[in-house]
Image (cartoon, rainbow, N blue to C red):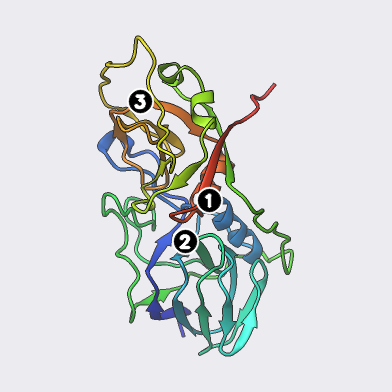
């Protein structure tokens, strides 16, 4: 039997994601890939395989899959309550999944994206060298749907080295995201303009980006002589903090456009980009200045 996952239910959104397709921005195709790269990387390390193999990215739980063949799996990212048949199972640990067993994910109490990693990787057909689904451009495999049979690749020659990995629990209060200066930081007079308010994640946020607003009406404004300046479109990167005319920052995530015309006034650190990918609408955010490397 060729090992596979049979999809019984998907929840709000389930995608196949790997490390993305770098190198195509010049022809208008973004990298995409796992929104929380750290969680995706940890899953690969737990099951003892290369980090570029594909896993499932599950938004707000709801996934139910049946194993076809005996599989080794791991759950990382948002801590969705999980059960193997009727037995609760842990995150950040190796799971031995017998043939025919059902893995069920509930809604995570914190975070929003859970990664289901299978030893051997999800082996759907790649597009431009990647198995990632880009929700902005539509490039990549289709969204996972009930009834899909997702093939699992051959197990690698390497073996898992640990049974479980320690993982810190989220701390209460506003989420602190570290930022570095962007190419247009001087347009707002420095990073202090971004770090003063406590922002809230807007309801129209997704894998493309997070829209932030201040419930008290504060906005970041441009300083002279940039108040009425215009920009040609410039290249965008994951973590770019763009400032639209309404003064509410937009934090670009994995499926960001390859170009944009609003000024990029800051850039999230790599860890902050991963953390931002786990934020839900309504969560409070503080943008704090990251210490510059010495």
Q: Is residue 71 visible?
A: no
Q: Secondary structure at mark 1?
A: helix
In percent of width and height, residue 61 lies at 47, 71
Q: Residue at x 45, y 54 (%)?
A: 282
Instruction: Check the picture and name the quadrant holding the C terminus.
Output: top right
Q: Is residue 165 visible?
A: yes
Q: Residue at x 62, y 50 (%)?
A: 173
Tell me the distance, in whole angstroms, between the alpha carbons under discs 1 and 3. 25 Å
Q: Residue at x 43, y 55 (%)?
A: 281
Viewer-side residue, 256 vs 249: 249
Q: Which numbered dot is residue 37?
A: 1
Q: Residues within 10 Å of mark 2 (few under 14, many from 20)?
A: many
Whether pointer 1 and pointer 3 mark residues with C-beta atoms closer than 8 Å, the reply is no
- Quadrant in the rendering for residue 209: top left
Q: Nearer the viewer, mark 1 or mark 3?
A: 3
Looking at the image, tell me whether mark 1 or mark 3 is earlier in sequence order: 1
Q: Which residue is mark 3?
A: 263
Residue tagged 2: 54
């Amino acid at each position: 039997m060729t090992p596979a996952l049979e999809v019984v239910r998907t929840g709000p959104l389930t995608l196949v994601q790997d490390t993305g397709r770098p190198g195509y921005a010049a022809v208008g195709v973004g990298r995409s890939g796992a929104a929380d790269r750290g969680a995706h990387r940890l899953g690969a390390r737990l099951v003892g395989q290369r980090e570029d193999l594909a896993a499932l990215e599950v938004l707000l739980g709801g996934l139910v899959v049946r194993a076809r063949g005996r599989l080794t799996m791991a759950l990382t990212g948002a801590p969705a309550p999980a059960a193997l048949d009727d037995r609760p199972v842990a995150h950040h640990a190796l799971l031995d999944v017998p043939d025919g067993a059902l893995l069920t994910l509930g809604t995570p109490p914190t975070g929003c994206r859970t990664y289901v990693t299978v030893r051997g990787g999800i082996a759907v057909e790649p597009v431009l060298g990647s198995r990632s689904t880009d929700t902005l451009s539509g490039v990549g495999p289709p969204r996972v749907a009930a009834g899909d049979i997702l093939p699992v690749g051959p197990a690698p020659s390497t073996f898992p080295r640990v049974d479980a990995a320690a993982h810190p629990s989220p701390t209460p209060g506003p989420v602190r995201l570290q930022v570095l200066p962007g190419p247009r930081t001087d347009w707002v007079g420095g990073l202090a303009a971004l770090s003063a308010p406590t922002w809230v994640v807007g309801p129209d946020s997704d894998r493309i980006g997070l829209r932030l607003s201040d419930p008290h009406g504060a906005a970041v404004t441009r300083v002279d002589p940039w108040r009425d300046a215009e920009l040609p479109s410039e290249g965008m990167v994951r973590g770019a903090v763009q400032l639209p005319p309404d003064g509410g920052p937009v934090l670009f995530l994995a499926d960001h456009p390859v170009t944009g015309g609003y000024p990029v006034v800051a850039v999230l650190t790599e860890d902050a980009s991963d953390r931002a990918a786990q934020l839900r609408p309504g969560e409070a955010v503080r943008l704090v200045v990251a210490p510059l490397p010495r």
